[in-house]
Image: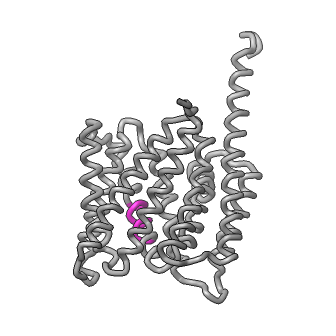
């Protein structure tokens, strides 16, 4: 039997996570034909919260004392998660799956920019250039002012902004707070948000097919989260990270098979630009880490009098 390396397993887990997430998106988009936004958020949230609670219980992380310094950070993270959920699903209800997924691939570039601006992380001119080119790719996909432009593309960009908030606040959480606990309370919070907002939308009859889709959507969300966590613990993250772009392949295939939608050439061109610059950013980060490690090794090899 062939034994896979840690890097190959990490890449496979990343691709599996992306497949799970885009399958969830597909099921939610199908549900949008029958249920209102907050109905779907609430009903899916119930199942996802129960699944997360079960996993947290198995990992003995169901009840955790949150350090005082982490409480406002968790609040900021929840605001990012809630805002991104509402904005993303609003866009998903109205945009082709491939278009929305392509826009969301600007996220690594946006997080890198946000980390440089707000967390003062070092970013060189090469990565700044890649970020600028990547955002040009997003404009190619969105095509503001062009015929066929959808205002819901703006909702997708709002979702990106909220996810940046979520990810940057997550970086500031202490290691005392388990990841599964953070995911569980976030799922519960999103479910409560859906319940609070239900009076603002029309409650439509929920059919058996809707319940089945939402249950499977919740399972795939939890599966995607689990694969993402395992990816972070296997192999070199800089090796597996570019495989997140496999989500575009899944989105295009499911868009064609399920919704009979073929992406336009502008969507494909813009997606290629975003993916290319994103992969270059991952590459430059890997180079930076190697250079930093080399400097540490070189410094440690100097005799005491030279340090």
What residue lies at 34% left-to-right and 48% top-to-bottom?
A: 71
Name the colouring of the figure: one colour
Please provide the residue range marked out in magenta: 79-87
In the figure, is residue 291 to the left or right of 158?
right
Q: Is residue 199 magenta?
A: no
Q: Quadrant of residue 5?
A: top right
| Residue 34: image location, x then y, percent | 32, 80
| Residue 299: image location, x then y, percent | 72, 20
Q: How many marks?
A: 0
**Predominant SS of the magenta segment:** helix
In the figure, is residue 189 to the left or right of 126?
left
What residue lies at 56% left-to-right and 70% top-to-bottom?
A: 98
Front-lying residue, 266 or 126 = 266
Front-lying residue, 186 or 9 = 9
| Residue 9: image location, x then y, percent | 53, 38
Front-lying residue, 187 or 20 = 20
Q: Quadrant of residue 78?
A: bottom left
* Furthest-front residue in this view: 1
């Amino acid at each position: 039997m062939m034994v896979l390396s840690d890097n190959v397993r990490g890449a496979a887990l990343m691709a599996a996570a992306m497949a799970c997430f885009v399958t969830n998106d597909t099921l939610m988009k199908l549900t949008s034909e029958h249920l209102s936004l907050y109905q779907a958020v609430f009903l899916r949230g119930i199942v996802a919260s129960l699944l997360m609670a079960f996993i947290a219980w198995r990992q003995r992380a169901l009840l955790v004392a949150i350090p005082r310094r982490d409480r406002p950070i968790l609040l900021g993270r929840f605001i990012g998660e809630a805002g991104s959920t509402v904005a993303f699903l609003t866009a998903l209800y109205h945009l082709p799956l491939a278009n929305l997924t392509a826009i969301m691939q600007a996220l690594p570039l946006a997080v890198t920019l946000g980390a440089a601006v707000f967390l003062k992380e070092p970013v060189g001119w090469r990565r700044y250039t890649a970020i600028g080119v990547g955002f040009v790719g997003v404009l190619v996909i969105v095509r503001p002012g062009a015929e066929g432009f959808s205002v819901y593309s703006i909702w997708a960009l709002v979702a990106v902004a909220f996810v940046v908030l979520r990810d940057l606040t997550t970086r500031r959480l202490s290691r005392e707070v388990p990841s599964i606990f953070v995911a569980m309370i976030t799922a519960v919070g999103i479910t409560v948000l859906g319940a609070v907002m239900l009076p603002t939308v029309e409650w439509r009859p929920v059919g058996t097919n809707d319940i089945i889709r939402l249950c499977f959507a919740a399972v795939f969300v939890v599966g995607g989260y689990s694969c993402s966590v395992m990816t972070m613990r296997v192999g070199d993250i800089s090796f597996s990270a570019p495989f997140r772009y496999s989500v575009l392949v899944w989105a295009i295939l499911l868009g064609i098979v399920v919704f009979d939608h073929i992406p336009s050439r502008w969507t494909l061109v813009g997606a290629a630009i975003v993916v290319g610059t994103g992969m270059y950013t991952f590459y430059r980060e890997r180079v930076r880490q190697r250079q930093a490690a080399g400097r540490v090794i070189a410094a440690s090899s100097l005799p005491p009098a030279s340090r």
